[in-house]
Image (spheres, rainbow, N blue to C red):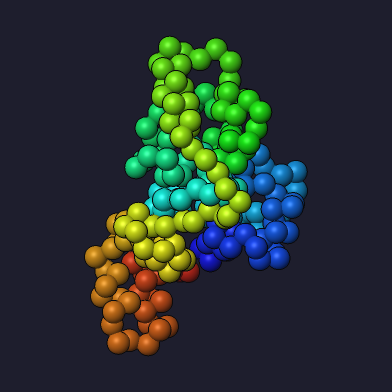
Amino acid sequence: MKIAFKILQKPDLPWVNWVFQHHSLDFTFKPHNPSYVWKIVNHQIPPPLQKIPFVLTNNGTSTFFWLDTWLLSTPLAKTYPHISTHSTSPSVLVSHVMHDGDGLLANLRNRLTLVAYVELMSVLSLLQDVTTSDTPDDRFLTHGSSFTSRCAYSLVSSNHRFDLNTGYIWGSKAPIKVKIFGWLLCRDRLSTMVN
């Protein structure tokens, strides 16, 4: 979770720059020889972290056009499902759409359905008012607090089916190794043959 947080929120760190030089944030295209860091980030960013934050887009280099909540109160893929299915890259970045010559049309397949065409017109009308700047994107959680790995993890884990035990386990005065054992027990992650 911390690696995904730093990649999304701290683009000026040297190792994050190295990751961007070797791998794009567009996770639909798997590299020929994926690194360990790419595998971790690919596992953490799109599914869980896309559901909880919203982004104030400045330069759009770490904001996903279809998957992030940045233009409306819901992600564009959820609001406009038909046109998002015509996208050639579901995890395209806002910077690629806004600064490319053809913009959104370059990211779409040919032969749109009528419903997708109507949704395209709605998205294009929304994009007319969007301006970008040179400052990095600001990422916040849905309830308005700043985006940190601790808060993001607590929101992701609160949606789990064992969330009733979370307060009892982590709020107890037991030693940390007992808390970790209890957490693994509730998550059915103990390393035993028969749990």
18 left or right, relative to 40: right
Q: Whole-percent x and y of residue 84? A: 48, 28
Q: Please give the name of the residue rendered at 44% of the width and 26% of the height, measured from the top-left corner.
A: 125
Q: Please give the name of the residue rendered at 30% of the width and 69% of the height, measured from the top-left corner.
A: 166
Who is closer to the viewer here, 98 or 156? 98
Position of the C terminus, as image quadrant, is bottom left
The image quadrant that residue 185 belongs to is: bottom left
Q: Please give the name of the residue rendered at 36% of the width and 63% of the height, measured from the top-left corner.
A: 145
Q: Whole-percent x and y of residue 159? A: 32, 56
Who is closer to the viewer here, 15 or 172? 15
Who is closer to the viewer here, 119 or 174? 119
Q: Whole-percent x and y of residue 126? A: 43, 31
21 left or right, relative to 70: right
| Residue 27 vertical position relative to residue 160 in the rendered view, above or below | above
**Residue 26 seen from this side:** yes
State how many labels appear. Answer: 0
| Residue 23 vertical position relative to residue 85 in the rendered view, above or below | below
20 left or right, relative to 114: right
The image quadrant that residue 153 belongs to is: bottom left
Q: Whole-percent x and y of residue 170? A: 32, 77
Who is closer to the viewer here, 9 or 171? 9
Q: Please give the name of the residue rendered at 25% of the width and 75% of the height, measured from the top-left corner.
A: 168
**Residue 88 seen from this side:** no
